[in-house]
Amino acid sequence: KAGVTQTPRYLIKTRGQQVTLSCSPISGHRSVSWYQQTPGQGLQFLFEYFSETQRNKGNFPGRFSGRQFSNSRSEMNVSTLELGDSALYLCASSLGGRGSAFFGQGTRLTVV
Amino acid sequence: DQQVKQNSPSLSVQEGRISILNCDYTNSMFDYFLWYKKYPAEGPTFLISISSIKDKNEDGRFTVFLNKSAKHLSLHIVPSQPGDSAVYFCAASPKITQGGSEKLVFGKGTKLTVNP
């Protein structure tokens, strides 16, 4: 069974640009969550999607957005990139509801 | 305001001995707790979890203990092996809201080094 796949693995962007990251969940998983990992803040919850609807959102500015498609694949978008957005962005999928989430390998975003 | 705290950034133990990783939380709404293990350049991997209705859960070499009154949990690894060297994250989940959304709140991690 394939795991959670995130693309691309690495990305370098310039301040002010926007970026789109992609996540393909484990087959059958309908819930997809996104997390940001930085050395200073650890892993922080961005948002969660289930059946194409955002069910939960963390404390991030509106520059961070996401969506989920009918096949459960999800994308997150960051507009007007800032240096502080440099981080590892992790996607996790689960069957929905209570349970352990399975994480992808992440996308390492560097903003210069 | 950090709701889940792992106060030890690092821990070093000898192979074969016990590793004890600690985690404290402040939010009484948390009712489900998990431990994840993370190697560099990889995503976190689920290790073990515990519901707030229990005080202990075991899975092979890994045991998680929950002390609700102290809002404290710990992960015991016995015996520790060099392959256990990784960063360990404690995570907590609040009571499921209407709609069934689950949001994990993570600690900042403890880097475990198991020396041969």
Image (cartoon, coloured by chain):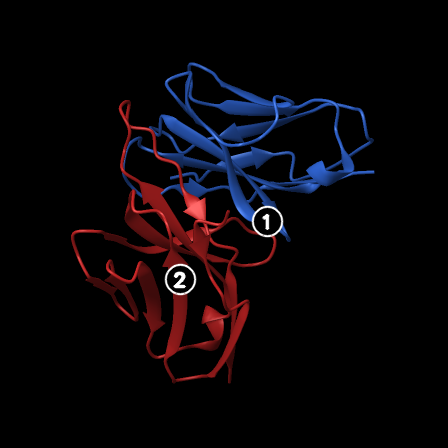
Chain colours: A blue, B red
Under mark 1, the amino acid is: Gln
Whether residue A46 is situated above or below residue B28 in the rendered picture: above
Q: Where is residue B114 in the image (x, y as percent from the top left)?
A: 49, 78
Whether residue B59 is situated above or below residue A94 in the rendered picture: below
| The quadrant where residue B99 appears | top left
Q: Where is residue B10 in the image (x, y as percent from the top left)?
A: 54, 71
The answer to whether residue B98 is left or right of residue A39 is left
Identify the element where label 2 is drawn. strand
Q: Position of residue B36 (x, y in %)?
A: 42, 55
Front one among A37 and A75: A37
For the point 34% across and 43% down, which residue is it? Answer: B93
How far is mark 1 from mark 2, CA to CA? 16 Å
Disc marking residue B23: 2
Residue under label 1: A41
Q: Position of residue B69 (x, y in %)?
A: 24, 60
- Which chain does tag 1 point to? A
| The quadrant where residue A6 appears | top right
- Which chain does tag 2 point to? B
Front one among A26 and A83: A83
For the point 65% across and 40% down, which residue is it? Answer: A9
Front one among A34 and A40: A40
Whether residues under marks 1 and 2 lie with C-beta atoms below 8 angstroms apart, the answer is no
Identify the element where label 1 is drawn. loop
